[in-house]
C-alpha cells in the first residue's frame, strides 16, 4: 500500500445548469512533502465548508486502481480527477474499515466515511450523470481525519496500524446509504455500531426506518427536489 500522488487545490469556479459556483475540486499534484494537520493538507482549500472539509473530512483519499475503469479519462492523466488529496494504491473502499488507522508518511489518518458523490463531479468532468456513475459503481473514495500531524509525499508507504473488529467498510456504508436504500436490516446494523456514522447520516437512516426516503435530486443533479426538467 502506498501513496501515488499528493494533491492540493485552490478555490475556482464551476458552471452548472446555467449558474456559476465556487469549488476547489480541481486539485494539483505537489512534488515534495506536504504538511498534514487537523484541518487537512497545508495549501488545500474548500469552497463549501458545510459539505466539505472539517475534522472528519480533512483528507480525501481515492484508489488509483479505479482510474483504469473510467474510460473517458486520458491514459496519461497527470492530475487527480476526483478532487482527492491522496491518490492511493492498495487500499480500496472495500478495504477501508471505518475507524481504521493508517500511518501515511509521518501522519496518522483514521478512516471516517465514504465520499457521497455530488453534482460538482458532473460539472468538473462536463458529464451530466457523472455523480450518478460514481455512486452506482461505488468508486467514490473515502475521507479520513488526522489523528497525528505529519508529512506525506508521493511514494510513501501506507501502513495499517489498527482495524476495528466490526469490519464495516466505507464500501458497506456507501452501499446502504446511497445505493440499496431499502436495505433496512443493514441500516439497523450501521445504527447499532457505536460511533460509526456522523449524526446527520444516522438521522437520515432513522428517517428511512420510519418510512421517509429522502430525495437525492439536489445532491446528485444540483436541482431542487421534484424538478424533473432535463430528464
Image (spheres, rainbow, N blue to C red):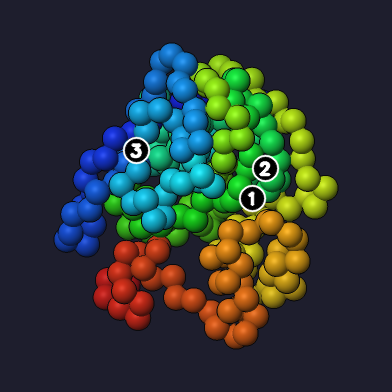
Is residue 217 visible in the rendered image? The answer is yes
Q: Secondary structure at mark 2?
A: loop
Helix, strand or loop at label 3? It is loop
* Rendered location of residue 81, percent (x, y): 40, 37
CA–CA distance in space, label 3 to label 2: 24 Å
| Numbered disc 1: secondary structure | helix
Where in the figure is residue 110, as x and y percent of width and height? 64, 39
Check the picture and name the quadrant holding the N terminus.
top right
Q: Is residue 127 above or below residue 43?
A: below
Q: Which residue is mark 1?
A: 170
- Quadrant of the snapshot with the C terminus: bottom left
Name the image quarter holding residue 10.
top left
To which residue does mark 3 refer?
A: 45
Q: Residue 222 in the image: state x and y as whole percent.
A: 32, 64
Q: Please name whichever residue, 78 or 31, is drawn nearer the observer in this view of the structure.
A: 31
Res. 96 mark: 2
Snapshot quadrant of residue 229:
bottom left
- Residue 79 in view, yes or no: no
Disc 2: CA contacts within 10 A as few (<14), some (14-19) or many (>=20): many
> Going 38% across and 71% down the picture, which residue do you hit?
217
The answer to whether 197 appears left or right of 58 in the picture is right
Q: Residue furthest right?
A: 165
The residues tagged by marks 2 and 1 sit, at their Cα atoms, a distance apart of 6 Å
Amino acid at each position: 500500500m502506498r501513496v501515488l500522488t499528493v494533491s492540493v487545490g485552490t478555490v475556482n469556479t464551476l458552471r452548472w445548469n446555467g449558474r456559476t459556483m465556487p469549488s476547489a475540486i480541481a486539485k494539483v499534484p505537489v512534488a515534495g512533502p506536504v504538511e498534514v494537520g487537523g484541518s487537512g493538507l497545508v495549501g488545500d482549500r474548500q469552497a463549501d465548508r458545510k459539505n466539505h472539509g472539517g475534522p472528519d473530512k480533512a483528507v480525501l483519499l481515492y484508489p488509483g486502481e479505479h482510474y483504469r475503469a473510467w474510460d473517458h479519462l486520458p491514459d496519461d492523466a497527470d492530475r487527480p480527477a476526483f478532487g482527492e488529496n491522496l491518490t492511493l494504491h492498495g487500499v480500496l473502499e472495500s478495504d477501508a474499515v471505518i475507524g481504521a488507522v493508517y500511518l501515511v508518511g509521518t501522519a496518522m489518518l483514521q478512516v471516517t466515511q465514504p465520499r457521497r458523490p455530488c453534482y460538482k463531479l458532473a460539472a468538473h468532468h462536463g458529464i451530466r450523470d457523472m455523480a450518478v456513475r460514481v455512486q452506482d459503481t461505488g468508486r467514490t473514495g473515502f475521507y479520513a481525519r488526522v489523528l497525528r500531524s505529519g508529512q506525506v509525499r508521493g511514494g510513501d508507504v501506507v501502513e495499517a496500524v489498527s482495524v476495528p473488529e466490526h469490519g464495516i467498510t466505507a464500501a458497506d456504508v456507501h452501499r446502504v446509504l446511497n445505493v440499496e436504500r431499502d436495505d433496512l436490516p443493514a441500516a439497523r446494523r450501521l445504527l447499532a455500531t457505536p460511533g460509526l456514522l456522523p449524526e446527520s447520516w444516522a438521522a437520515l437512516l432513522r428517517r428511512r426506518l420510519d418510512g421517509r426516503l429522502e430525495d437525492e435530486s439536489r445532491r446528485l443533479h444540483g436541482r431542487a427536489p421534484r424538478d424533473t426538467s432535463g430528464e
